Amino acid sequence: MKREFKLNDIESVAKELIETASDKVVCFYGDMGVGKTTLIKALVKEIGAVDTANSPTFGLVNEYANIKGEPIAYHFDFYRLNDEMEALDMGFEDYLSSSAWLFIEWPEKIKSLLPADYVGVFLRFIDENTRSIELNIS
């Protein structure tokens, strides 16, 4: 999947991504401010989380649950990570073994910890209201 989209179409992009993703580990690549968190918010809503997603920049990870209180997604923001050991110290490998969706911003910071079959989402800035999205399935 590779296409341009307007930011007001983000919900349809999220729906399409959930339907086409081959794995629940989804890594988001793109410059600061390109819309990674905005897309993840739409994805969390699309899969039925009861909470509204927000950036976990300072806590590194946010958990989102369904109406039954079961975790259905984890949102990681590794921007402030200094090395992969910090991700291991927070139990990242345990998250990988869960059945929940894992949405990971700045995955290049933990490259060697990612599973081989993760889905890569590449966002690029076109203009103030338009982005390019490319979905790569490993």
Image: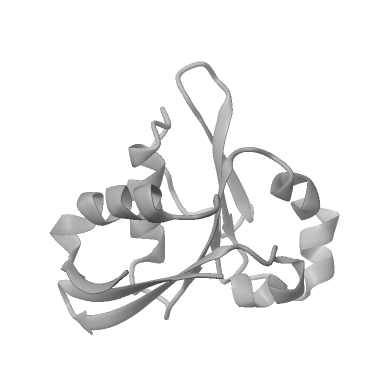
Q: Position of residue 19 (x, y in %)?
A: 36, 48
Query: Residue 68 or 116: which is nearer the viewer?
Result: 116
Residue depicted at x 39% and y 31%: 48
Quadrant position of residue 47: top left
Quadrant position of residue 60: bottom right
For residue 58, side relative to residue 95 (left or right)? left
Q: Position of residue 79 (x, y in %)?
A: 59, 71
Q: Say which quadrant the N terminus sits in.
A: bottom left
Compared to 75, does 124 lie above or below? below
Q: Position of residue 29 (x, y in %)?
A: 47, 74
Residue depicted at x 42% and y 77%: 32
For residue 113, side relative to residue 75 (left or right)? right
Query: Residue 27 or 84: which is nearer the viewer?
Result: 27
For residue 24, side relative to residue 48 (left or right)? right
Colour scheme in the image? one colour
Q: Say which quadrant the C terminus sits in.
A: bottom right
Q: How many marks?
A: 0
Compared to 82, does 20 lie above or below? above
Residue depicted at x 70% and y 63%: 115
Residue depicted at x 55% and y 20%: 69
Q: Position of residue 64 (x, y in %)?
A: 52, 36
Query: Residue 62 or 92: which is nearer the viewer?
Result: 92
